Image (tube, rainbow, N blue to C red):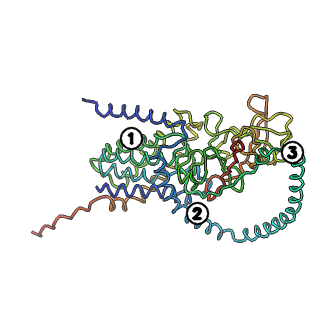
Amino acid sequence: MRMNRAVLGGILLIILEYGLVPWLIPPAWSGRLMPHLAFVLMIYVAAFGGRHSGFFYGIGFGLIMDVLNYGSMIGPYAFGMGLAGYLGGLALERRPPALAGMMLATAVSSLGLSHMIYLIYRLFSLTSWSYAFAFYWNILPTMLLETLIALAFYIPVRRFLLKSVPSPPEEPAS
Amino acid sequence: MRNKRLFILMIGLIVFIAVMGFTLGRTRLTWPEKFLSDTFGTLQGILYRPASAVSDFIGDLSRLSAIQKENELLRQTVAQYAREQVRYNLIEAENERLKKELGFKERQERLYKYRYLIAQVVGRSSNPFDPTIRINLGARDGIKPQMAVTTSDGLVGLVSQVSEFTSTVEPITVLSATTGQGVQIAATILGKEKDSFGIIESYDPETGMLQLTKIDENDPMAPGDTVITSGLGNVYPRGIIIGTVVDRQVGDFGLTEKANVLPAARFDQLQEVFVIVVPDVDAP
């Protein structure tokens, strides 16, 4: 798996996420729906590159997202994405799943990351949203949107990240 | 060592909780953070503004007839303002004359001359609990933390962190009574500044309304009034429009009343904001 391309793609996705995605989301949903494009790419990196790649990729891009989002503190996204990258890599590295498995993995990881961020903010008493409110207001729609984004990314990312495998020579007919 | 992974997880948890604790309350940024903010801010700006122009264009196409009516209305309003400008000039000249006659010191004269710096929005955060906005003015343009930020509609928030070329704005939608986020706004009503007073304490994301609390029972506030900042509290400059009163009811403990205020500014797809620079009256 080509890590240089993964990092380059991640930086491009972060620029898109902060500069372009706010215009694509309708105003009524703008506080609710916040897809993390670099996070979706990280799940693919964890699946194709293994758990260590996923872990360091997650921490690196989590730190970038934390500094760009720096409203109250630095740390939640770095920790959450590092953990999600490691666990995703642990679950997926042996046999990278096909389309449906990948989307299931993205849905579960997205739920995990959103819950982790919410719980960290509750721990430091920086938000007053109740759990039920946070779930239906933000966590659930974001998970559905990120699963759709993973679906859209599947073929381009496979071609972008994986070295192509040469097909074996054909056997002569007996 | 057998449980190496769990050990590393525990160490990582401790390290991260320490990092989160250290970065929790500070406003000054170290240079790597400033560098990252500025780099990404500039790159995002290249993308954000054309996208906003395209979005505007498509929005305009779909409301062409409404725009024509709006145009007509705006023409009439401008004509009315041109007429009122004459009256305003006369009143202002008289005000200056009366102030001189009363012998106002120069300090008080400079107090309410605010400077409005226009800033472009280059991006917004993708963290639902920290909905900050990034603007393209920074320390080299004279921005300092805790300056008020508004649009032409109303108050948006305060500047929270400043890098060299960009700054971060914390909107008033993070105000909450239970957590310590945001700075509470001392507010009054336009037209009833001597009689009305309240404090905007929190924002409810579900209804999209600000809560104005600690209103006296005999307060002459009514639904439909315009809420403005009162300048008391020395954080928000006075006279900035916040929103309109929607309703009014008895407060939490029965001693005071509270009201719901619909914010006048929009917080989502912003393109340009004004940063208000209050002159430093104590400087030589």
Instruction: Name the residue nearer the viewer: A53 or B273.
Output: B273
SS for tag 2?
helix
SS for tag 3?
loop
Disc 3 residue type? Gly
Q: Give x and y (percent) for residue B133.
A: 58, 51
Query: Pointer 1: residues within 10 angstroms few (<14), some, or many (20+)?
Result: many
Q: Which residue is mark 1?
A: A83
Q: Are marks 1 and 3 on the same chain?
A: no
Q: Give x and y (percent) for residue A146.
A: 46, 52
Q: Which residue is mark 2?
A: B52
Q: In this picture, is B101 found above or below B16?
A: below
Residues tagged 1 and 2 counted as in contact (Cβ below 8 A): no
Q: Which residue is mark 3?
A: B103
Determine the chain carrying the residue at label 1: A
Q: Give x and y (percent) for residue A120.
A: 49, 36
Query: What residue appears at the point 83 percent right and 39 percent down from the top-left corner?
Result: B196
Q: Give x and y (percent) for residue B225.
A: 81, 47
Query: What residue appears at the point 86 percent right and 55 percent down from the top-left corner?
Result: B92
**CA distance for labels 1 and 3:** 67 Å
Q: In this picture, is B177 found above or below A141?
A: above
Disc 1 residue type? Leu
Q: Which tag is nearer the camera, tag 1 or tag 2? A: 2
Query: Pointer 3: residues within 10 angstroms few (<14), some, or many (20+)?
Result: few
Residues tagged 1 and 3 counted as in contact (Cβ below 8 A): no
Q: Which mark is residue A107?
A: none
Query: Pointer 2: residues within 10 angstroms few (<14), some, or many (20+)?
Result: some
Instruction: Name the residue nearer the viewer: B209 or A154.
Output: B209
